[in-house]
Amino acid sequence: MRRATARIGLLAGAALLAGCTPAPAPVDGPPSAPPRPGAEPAATCSPEGIRITGLGVSAAMGLRAMGLDLVNCGDRPYELRGYPAVALRDADGDAITVRIIPGAAPITAGFDHPPTRIVLAPGERAGAALIWRNLVTDPTVVATAGAELDVAPSTGRPAYPVELDGPIDLGNTGRLGVSAWKRRDADPATQAPPRSDPPAPSTSPVNPL
């Protein structure tokens, strides 16, 4: 009987000691991978429920065309009418004086369809284009190049920065054509102009619309 009582006492003491032993610290999972060098965060949806991005530049014989994509990333219909309102800044962030031309008739043909009223349902897209020529014809006029671009859906609405994959090199023309918004029926990733060296002189710039 005394042996049984002693054994019970020893077991109870061992259990008590085990209970006082601190539990092992939880093991953290593997650290998250560092961000990929050069990776840029995806553009976010604006407070008014839209996102505007650039689609790259197509170039040929001094003529440039850059596509713009606007997606309704909100939860209600979004109305577009007319032309994007654009502004350029140089590498120091200073505004560049540019003559904005609705359509591109003085610059080239094929980008001057008239504006129409567009109502985008959530998830739908519209596209427009910027058109310019990189010409230097007057040595007394300093050539300009836009390093930063701001785009508003139309005059009077908030403007948003749009990332460029290269400068908007206006030469000394001082003018930039802007096409009207047009509804897109497909994902613009399949319609974006090539981001490569200018094509041979015999080719024409790709219309990003």
Image: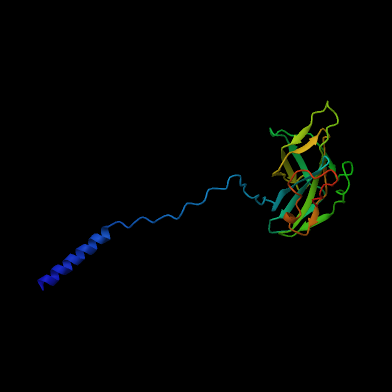
Scheme of image coloration: rainbow
Please tell me which residue lies in front, 162 or 187: 187
In the rendered view, would you say 2 is above or below 64? below
Decide if residue 155 is in sight here. no
Q: Which residue lies furthest to the top in this view?
A: 140
Position of residue 97 in the picture relative to residue 41 (left or right) = right
Which residue occupies 27% across, 61% down? 19
Q: Which residue lies furthest to the bottom in this view?
A: 1
Q: Residue furthest left?
A: 2
Decide if residue 124 is in sight here. yes
Which residue occupies 87% across, 49% down? 110
Image location (x, y in percent) of residue 37: 58, 45
Q: Quadrant of residue 146?
A: top right
Please tell me which residue lies in front, 175 or 56: 56
Image location (x, y in percent) of residue 158: 72, 45
Please tell me which residue lies in front, 109 or 176: 109
Q: Quadrant of residue 63?
A: top right
- Quarter of the image with the N terminus is bottom left
In the rendered view, would you say 7 is above or below 99? below
Which residue occupies 83% across, 55% down? 117
